[in-house]
Amino acid sequence: MLEREVAQWLHTAQIQIDQGQLEGAVESLRRALSLDPDEAEAHAILALCLLDLKRIYAAEHEANIALTLEPESTLVLRASAHVAMYRRRFKLAEERFNELLEREPNESSSYRGMADLYRLTGRRKQARPLLDKALELDPDDPGTWTDLGTWHLNQGDVDNAEKNAFKALEISPEYYRGLILMGQVHLQRGELEQARDHAIWALRQDPGDQAALYLIASIKARKSVLLGSWWRFSTWMGNIGDGRAIVVLLGAFVLFRLSTITADGFGHEDLARYIQFLWLALVAYTWISPAVFGRSLKRELSAIKLDQNF
């Protein structure tokens, strides 16, 4: 009887996860664990849910418990790999994903996980074949279509991102990650009302979803006179990758220094001073804008908590 009840709670949690109701899934998993604290699968799934909710230390705690209980489980290993990745222990994460790929060569989620790791470590080109392999293994997984669409969006290919988002939503019309991706596509095109509609649809699945709230805050930033330029620059810098972003920043600083030195050298002290003021203003702008954006995001979080009826 107890095993059946635990299984029912796990089944309920999986349905909630598929619908993007992560807080509900966490509660269901905790109920399962209250009945059987040694259920390693429940600890592993809970760790993955907590990761999606950005509660990384709590996720690490659950993953460690699962590893202690059942270290040979592939599900437990997957949870541990994802936790290591988001704790930025990239070498350990890669070792565990490689082990998963050896043990389950036909499991699409392992390829998606490794692709995510490659994205975080700046190996975006290497991520694409892994996503293609995941899609080949499970063409009906909306998560893979969404990941592939996000890959295209990060490459600046909005059209292919839209096609992949559409395919994900064709498979699962209420898939919240697909809704968010489609919202991001509309945002990139400046179609702000459509972007907001998709963010709201995603929030209906999970009112506390950080990605959907971030999308709404990004829409507000795009409309803002103060934040609009910063948002476009920040998005562009994020898309070109960490290495190129560093080159851009260093190049801008070198250009600034050369300009002031050249102006001074030709006796244009006022021009040199003007360039210095302009540079300081730009630096201040890039420091202030993220703080303003952060406050906007917090306001969205507060509004959602106060009113969950859209």
Image (cartoon, rainbow, N blue to C red):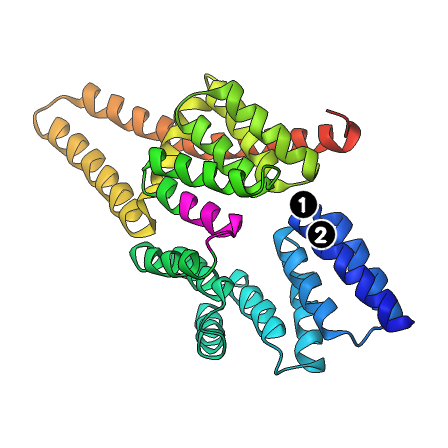
State how far apart marks 2 and 1 are (Cα).
6 Å
Is 54 left or right of 96, judged from the image as shown?
right
Question: Seen from this angle, which residue lies furthest right?
Answer: 1
Dot 1: what SS? Answer: loop
- State the residue in front, 5 or 26: 5
Give the residue drawn at x 16%, y 31%: 259
Give the residue drawn at x 52%, y 52%: 141
- Residue 155: give its label: none
Q: Tally the numbered discs.
A: 2
Dot 1: within a 10 Å radius of its alpha carbon, few (fewer than 14), some, or many (20 or more) residues? some
Q: Position of residue 188 (x, y in %)?
A: 40, 28
Q: Which residues are magenta?
A: 139-150
Is 60 left or right of 179, judged from the image as shown?
right
Residue 135 lies in magenta, yes or no?
A: no
In the image, is residue 99 above or below residue 202? Answer: below
Question: Seen from this angle, which residue lies furthest left?
Answer: 266
Indicate the amino acid at tag 1: Gln
Residue named by callout 1: 19
In the image, is residue 286 above or below residue 145? Answer: above
Indicate the amino acid at tag 2: Ile
Q: Are marks 2 and 1 in contact (CB under 8 Å)?
A: yes
Quarter holding the N terminus?
A: bottom right
Residue named by callout 2: 15
Dot 2: within a 10 Å radius of its alpha carbon, few (fewer than 14), some, or many (20 or more) residues? some
Q: Position of residue 254 (x, y in %)?
A: 20, 40
In the image, is residue 92 above or below residue 50? Answer: below
Dot 2: what SS? Answer: helix
Is 306 left or right of 192, judged from the image as shown?
right
Give the residue drawn at x 66%, y 34%: 203
Q: Position of residue 226 (x, y in %)?
A: 46, 20
